[in-house]
């Protein structure tokens, strides 16, 4: 015998399936529009059907998305940030995810995650971006305030960067202002050999 709770769950599942089917038929929204949708009140309940599309964004799309994110009111940026860090690392591109992480670090929030989970998201993003575009990832790292998030991001960027260009990674590390940070990261560069 089905209970009222079972019926509600079944209806919710069917509604989600219908949205998924429709999402395959609809063209993906422009990058700025997707960011605005992620920041809307109902985004968490409605799902993030087009976040997979971020993987195919061009540099122009990324610039549009980043600009749209920065223009959002604080509360909307909070919502969008939480949703972007909840998505798997491969669904949300590192440049966009870094915007969300930077916003959360600056606001002193972990986006609803434990400290460990949050630092894992920072590390994953830094490593992924460090493999693809270490200079851009390094620029992001230096924009973060001193603290655990910056330290873990820096470690992962340097590890990835040194894996394919020890000289460039060393050059970036040697240009950092904090001596303690430089020493730790230079050891990571050395270990990468």
Image (spheres, rainbow, N blue to C red):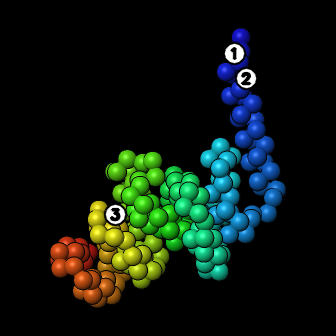
| Front residue (pair 174, 43) | 43
* Helix, strand or loop at mark 1: loop
Relative to 98, 159 lies left or right: left
Residue wearing tag 2: 7
Q: Quadrant of residue 31?
A: bottom right
In the picture, the disc for residue 57 is none
Callout 1 environment at 10 Å: few (<14), some (14 to 19), or many (20+)? few
Relative to 105, does residue 8 appear above or below in the rendering? above
Q: Which mark is residue 149?
A: 3
Q: Position of residue 190 (x, y in %)?
A: 20, 78
Mark 2, Cα crowd under 10 Å, few <14 / some 14-19 / many 20+, is few
Q: Which picture quadrant has residue 157?
A: bottom left
The picture places residue 10, in percent across and down from the top left corner, at: 72, 28
Left or right: 118 in relation to 33: left
**Label 2 SS:** helix
Query: Disc 1 marks which residue?
Result: 3
Image position of 149 with respect to 22: above or below = below
Of the 4 image quadrants, the one containing the C terminus is: bottom left
Q: CA distance from mark 3 to mark 2?
A: 44 Å
């Amino acid at each position: 015998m089905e209970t009222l709770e079972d019926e509600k769950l079944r209806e919710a599942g069917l509604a989600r399936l219908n949205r998924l089917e429709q999402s395959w038929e609809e063209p993906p929204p422009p990058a700025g529009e997707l960011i605005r949708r992620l920041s809307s009140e109902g985004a968490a309940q409605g799902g993030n059907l087009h976040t997979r599309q971020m993987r195919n964004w061009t540099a122009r799309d990324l610039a549009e998305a980043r600009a749209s994110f920065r223009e959002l009111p604080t509360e909307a940026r909070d919502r969008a940030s939480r949703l972007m860090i909840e998505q798997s690392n491969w669904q949300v591109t590192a440049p966009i995810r870094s915007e969300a992480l930077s916003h959360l670090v600056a606001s002193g929030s972990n986006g609803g995650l434990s400290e460990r989970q949050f630092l894992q998201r920072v590390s994953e993003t830094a490593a992924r971006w460090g493999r693809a575009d270490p200079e851009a990832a390094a620029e992001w790292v230096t924009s973060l305030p001193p603290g655990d998030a910056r330290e873990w991001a820096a470690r992962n960027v340097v590890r990835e960067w040194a894996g394919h260009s020890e000289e460039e990674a060393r050059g970036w590390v040697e240009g950092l202002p904090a001596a303690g940070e430089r020493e730790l990261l230079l050891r990571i560069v050395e270990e990468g050999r």
